[in-house]
Image (spheres, coloured by chain):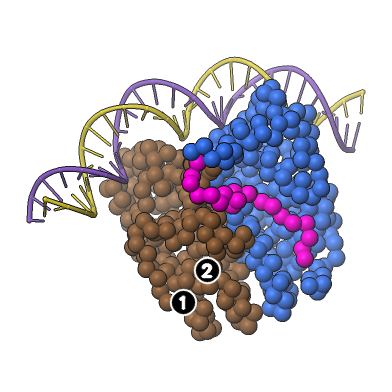
Chain colours: A brown, B blue, C yellow, D purple
Amino acid sequence: MKRIDKVIDKRHAIRRGEFLYRQGDVFESLYAIRLGHFKTSIGTPDGRVQVTGFQMAGEVIGFDGIVGGRHSCDAVALEDAQVCKMPFNRMEELSRDIPSLQHHIHRLLGREIVRDQGVMLLLGAMSADERVATFLLNLVQRLHARGFAQTELVLRMTREDIGSYLGLTLETVSRTFSRFAAEGILLVKQRQIQILSTAGLRRVGNLDDTGADAAPRPLAASEQVANVPLTAS
Amino acid sequence: MKRIDKVIDKRHAIRRGEFLYRQGDVFESLYAIRLGHFKTSIGTPDGRVQVTGFQMAGEVIGFDGIVGGRHSCDAVALEDAQVCKMPFNRMEELSRDIPSLQHHIHRLLGREIVRDQGVMLLLGAMSADERVATFLLNLVQRLHARGFAQTELVLRMTREDIGSYLGLTLETVSRTFSRFAAEGILLVKQRQIQILSTAGLRRVGNLDDTGADAAPRPLAASEQVANVPLTAS
DNA sequence: CGGCCCATTGATGATTGTCAAAGCTGGTGG
DNA sequence: CCACCAGCTTTGACAATCATCAATGGGCCG
């Protein structure tokens, strides 16, 4: 299991605003984020952009290149960052001998697929309030799993990025933050967010499974959008 | 390569409306669709539903169960169907000895991820007209790859299903079909659709990369939402 | 043949987008 | 070290897209 290290090239530094890879780049590697946050996005032929995700330390990025041999989206560092490059064909080779690595790769890919489904639910079936609330809860959850506070976060991305990710305009995002603040749910100071009422956020996000007249199926643990362990072991 | 067959259990018949699997079911297998169309969907705690995709013969379904050990969405047959069950742990075992199978699995997962990104773009950045046009073009493209006509299709799903998939109401879908028909782009007769002008559909869908003032990057081949080969070889 | 589900169409309204202006912040260069 | 500038954020007024509510019609299956 320690031999996983053998796949990992040395660390690679990326400055804020630089591309880790671009749409159309030849796919070679996955990247384990060591430090910093990234965003991924794709564009329409006519220039509009959709942010497809925000990734943080401990997460793996680059799956979009596996199928076509080229990356299908852009990945940009939202702040100075470090990644470990993991050549994918070496990972494939090694995973033939190391079942745990093989299984780990499958879980990474499967997790990305489930995450994407959560985003579809967000974009296709939720109101602006619900989207923003869900977004914030997801972020703090992931940060908390990394040892940060459960009620405070610093947004690494702009309102425009958030809006693009959530299928909203930056103005709607800003207004929603302001309204949540007015309702006593948040404290918003530019990119510093403090959650005053997690329960309140859950409520406006309709994420309470208070079982009122919800689906009778008992197991709803699969609703978690993303929850990535820090280590790759 | 012929030994791929050894993973495949015998065929399994599913009636229209039956579940291939449900949210929460223990994950055991992927399923290769032999006949018929399926839809996959997830639900919010409060009962709303988001259709996450429509799958047809030749496509593989079930990836959502890999990560959690349980399926995170429902899969329903839209008509009487047949699938081949492929136990996933057997696939993992075999793929250690058969690199081409290993690679194939990775491509399947990677393709699903890219497809999901396309749906995010659809839901997050496109108007109702664009969504409907993109949806139809994607369907005929996949059908055409299976030997069907490029300009005719029979919808296997309801307007409500389409609406849920596209993040619209069934009424908006119906109205958009009617308007496209009035504009001479389509011929709509319940679920029978005839495309009178593929170019017109592309236009209303803003899928023309007429390079007018589009992004300077030349390689835009990655915009294809899904394009699955029939054989699993 | 009847009932039920699905589709179509209309009227109305709400949520969210668009356009605009002003204030704040952080970084850069003098 | 301070000041300025550029980009980001906030807030307002207005408009448009799309959802909601409602009623009718059509087709398929039992």
Q: Which residue appears at 42% of the width and 69% of the height?
A: A83
Residue under label 2: A29
Q: Which residue appears at 60% of the width and 62% of the height?
A: A69
Q: Nearer the viewer, residue A152 or A165?
A: A165
Residue kind at label 2, given as amino acid type: Ser
Judge whether residue B228 is colored magenta: yes
From what the image shows, is residue A112 above or below residue A120? below
Q: Residue C7, located in which quarter of the rendered image?
A: top right
Chain for mark 2? A
Residue kind at label 1, given as amino acid type: Asp
Residue B163 visible in the picture: no
From what the image shows, is residue D22 above or below residue A188? above
Residue under label 1: A9
Judge whether residue B208 is colored magenta: no
Q: Which residues are magenta?
A: B214-233
Q: Which mark is residue A173?
A: none
